[in-house]
Amino acid sequence: MRAASVSDYRELARRRLPRIFFEYIDGGSYAEETLRRNVADLEAIALRQRVMKDMSKLDMSIETLGQKLSMPIGLAPVGMAGMYGRRGEVQAARAAAKAGVPFCLSTVGVCSVEEVAGCGTPPWFQLYMLKDRGYMRELLSRAKDLGSPVLVFTVDLPTPGARYRDVRSGFTGASRLEAALTQAWDGITHPGWTWDVFIHGRPHTLGSVVGAVKESRRVTDFLAWIARNFDRSVTWKELDWVRETWDGPIVIKGVLDPEDARDAVKAGAQGLVVSNHGGRQLDGVKSSVSALPRIADAVGDDLEVYMDGGIRSGLDVLKALSLGAKACFVGRAWAYALGAGGEAQVARMLATLKSELAVAMILTGCNSVRQAGPGLLDRD
Ligand SMILES: Cc1cc2nc3c(=O)[nH]c(=O)nc-3n(C[C@H](O)[C@H](O)[C@H](O)COP(=O)(O)O)c2cc1C
């Protein structure tokens, strides 16, 4: 099948990836209410069709946090991408750099920040608050020294939400024997992935944190270490010491409440991502897009407001921009594309989002993404 849309990449990834990884990408927490809402609430928004405007010129570029982006889209941090494609973070970072959009590297990426930066464009760097502050400090200075332009500080994971699909697939909670058997079966039934990732995509460690998890060998051991290391005691004050090591822009990821958004401004952040972690944390919370307008109103121009969660097309991007986002990040969309066929498919997926955004702009009479606002929506 030749993929035409994000849902096609999802189907290709479902066929190519071992079940444990497909379910890990695709799933959300608990009953997956919020995961569904993220998508459904975007779908329910109606764009306002306009005609007979001069749409010969379109400007999709934005400047944000000192960077010029070719379109208001970025690749959200997605853990373990190196298990979906051979050295997956590097492949996705290359596709993003060629498309002129940021790639944000997860703390729990298979490829280290050094390996990704080595491909030419230092990534935005995502960090979780870990109990091991010494190691966090070390990670921050490594990313800074490599030239990462933006720190994305994820705050909606003081503890991991329960993901039922990961238990059912045997990804979490399985004994070593069960895990080995699942892996062997996955290898036999997914030969393309086995050749590309399992054999040629090593090492399968979490590259940026490998130094802190010396006793571990399997990716799941690293994830268990991370899960034990999430810090529930974290408050806004922690940003003070983060700033001692990191003097660049800081984006707070995982804000869903206007009061928290105002606190992020007070704490001196330069940006925030309206996000519920793609419906992977507290199930039952509202969708990102429904939280967006109040947050955008609450902070005005005090910082950059981005959004992620449920973006599956360029049309969704324009809807989010109309409701106050400066740019959108996509998580599953690029993880599916990577799983479907590596860098080439991530590049095609980004090109698809771009052409869909262009069509949406032309048919709503919007010449520049910077002018997107509520007037592009039909609210009757
Ligand atoms: C497989 C997967 C792994 C993720 N890993 C991380 C992570 O390591 N750090 C982080 O801040 N967010 C992580 N996220 C959340 C994404 O950054 C983003 O918030 C979410 O995917 C957006 O929703 P979408 O998938 O509907 O686009 C992950 C999401 C997925 C699907």
Image (cartoon, rainbow, N blue to C red):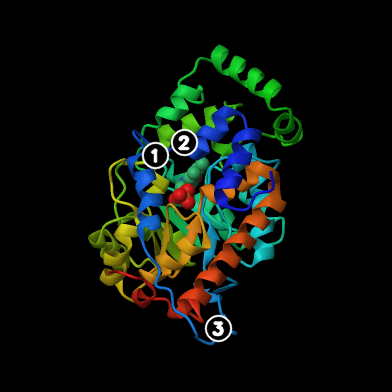
In the image: residue 252, left or right of residue 235? right
User: Is 59 on the left or on the right of 42, as rendered?
Assistant: right
Q: Looking at the image, is 83 positioned above or below residue 184?
A: below
Type of amino acid at the residue the image marks with label 3: Met
Asked whether 107 or 56 is in front, the reply is 56
- Residue 271: x and y, percent? 41, 66
Name the residue carrying label 2.
Answer: 226
Q: Position of residue 260 (x, y in %)?
A: 27, 59
79 lies left or right of 194: left
Find residue 230 and name its label. Answer: 1
The kind of residue on which mark 2 rests is: Ile
| Quarter containing the N terminus | top right
Residue 155 position in % (x across, y down) = 37, 50
**Spatial CA span between label 3 and label 1:** 49 Å
| Res 55 label | 3
Amino acid type of the residue that numbered disc 1 sits on in the rendered structure: Phe
